[in-house]
Amino acid sequence: MSNTNGPVPTERAKYGAAAVAHLTGELPNPFPRIMGPNAMKYLREIVDSGLSVDMLSRFESAFAEAYGVKHCIATPGCTPALAVLGAAFGFEPGDEVIVSPVTDYGTLMGLLVENYIPVFADTEPGTVNVSAATIEPRITDRTRAILVVHKTGLICDMDPINRLAQERGLIVYEDVCQAVFGEYKGQLAGTLSKAAGFSFDSEKTMGSDVGGCIITDDDDLAGQARFLGHSRGARQMPGFGRIHTARGYAHRMPQCTAAISLAQLEIIRPNVAHRDKMARLLLDLIGQIPGLTPLPIPDYVNVYSCWMIGFSIDPTAFRCTADEFGEQLAEEGIPGAGTGRYYLMPEALTFLREKAEAKAYPFSTPPASREFSYGADTCPNAHAFLENFVRWATFCEKYAPEHCELAAEIIRRVAERNRDRS
């Protein structure tokens, strides 16, 4: 980007420990991460074997067993996991996939690379998640799938979504990057649909160095995902060697990442159980502060694998904006507190809006069946929610009851200081 005065300075996005290295405060920070006790043992196995040990398969088998599914395909991250799934479904350019508007670019990258058209369903009022009721109006004769996102770890109400999809002949799959080992009506998030993608990036709940995976019980889908995601779309021809019969990827999880992920898998269940307990305590305390509405946990969420915690402010109750409220929380000791408007993908993906406006491929007709537009006004519930939502992604397994009480006290102090008493 440039202007007549020269380049406009920009800062690249940071991830993992680098993204929070500057944060200060009285509450725990996820870094340094708590590591599974066998992490160094598994890493040493790789080195001592001269890279001949198959740690990748060991992790895949262990994760599949933990989830009670037939297949786990490990990837370098969550973005590649969902990209491989998008490719494996084999839809046509211009086909539509309905997805949540409140998410991260990683959810959408694979759709865009495959030239599918993302169609954003609005969220339910006052929440971060879509529902069957908000999805249904977005279904057309070009819809092929619904990609649900369990944002912050809160699981979407999947039974109605699955019923709707079955009635319309659509595939449902899940983005479980923030909800690892969360439970919906006694079932694990990720087992509630045809397939799911996970994240093990260092800041996530089951944090490795990087990493992700796909799970599914569908043999054909798993085979296609391995073919496209691990084998680069290549087959062996006798007397010749590799021939590439499809456009594939080298999205294999590195062996050292598999080693760390395997060690983290061994400690994840108590981690998630503790997060669930602390999140419910903290949100209950926040709910006692007038003018604040904690992120609601639906009754059907048995285990809230909380990666990000937050609440909404009533703008009529305070003399400050949500941004100012978040800034003051950070200054008072809650590291990383602030708003998250950038999660609104129809507004944040400016290149997508520009392509649609220009009717550039695949938004040209054909392959698109109609004109598309993107912006905050296309998902008014999600836009309104994020305007007044304050959150922090440094909530972690290190929280104890006293940290929840301290966080609530900081929030209470900021609320009282800014309360509109007119």
Image (tube, rainbow, N blue to C red):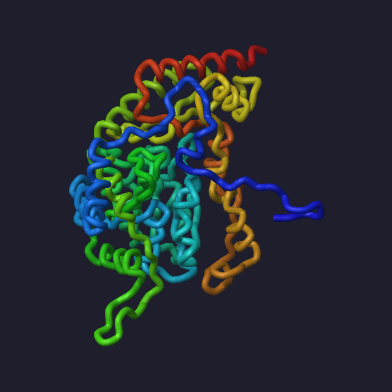
| Residue 232, image x, y percentages | 36, 70
Q: Nearer the viewer, residue 353 or 1?
A: 1
Query: Quick check: can you spot residue 233?
Result: yes
Query: Which residue occupies the foreground of this view, 56 or 335?
Result: 56
Give the total number of marks visible in the rendering: 0
Location of residue 182 by image quarter: top left
From the viewer's perspective, is residue 80 above or below residue 122? below
- Residue 252 picture location, percent across and down: 33, 59
**Residue found at x 81% / y 55%:** 4
Please state which of residues 342 and 267 is positioned toward the viewer in this rendering. 267
Classify the position of the N terminus by image quarter: bottom right
* Lateral position of residue 341 relative to residue 394, left or right: right
Image coordinates of residue 243 in percent, x first then y, are 34, 80
Say if residue 216 shows up in the picture.
no
Residue at 27% of width from left, 83% of height from top?
A: 237
Picture residue at 22% right of the left edge, 55% below the top: 49
Quadrant of the rendered image containing residue 207: top left
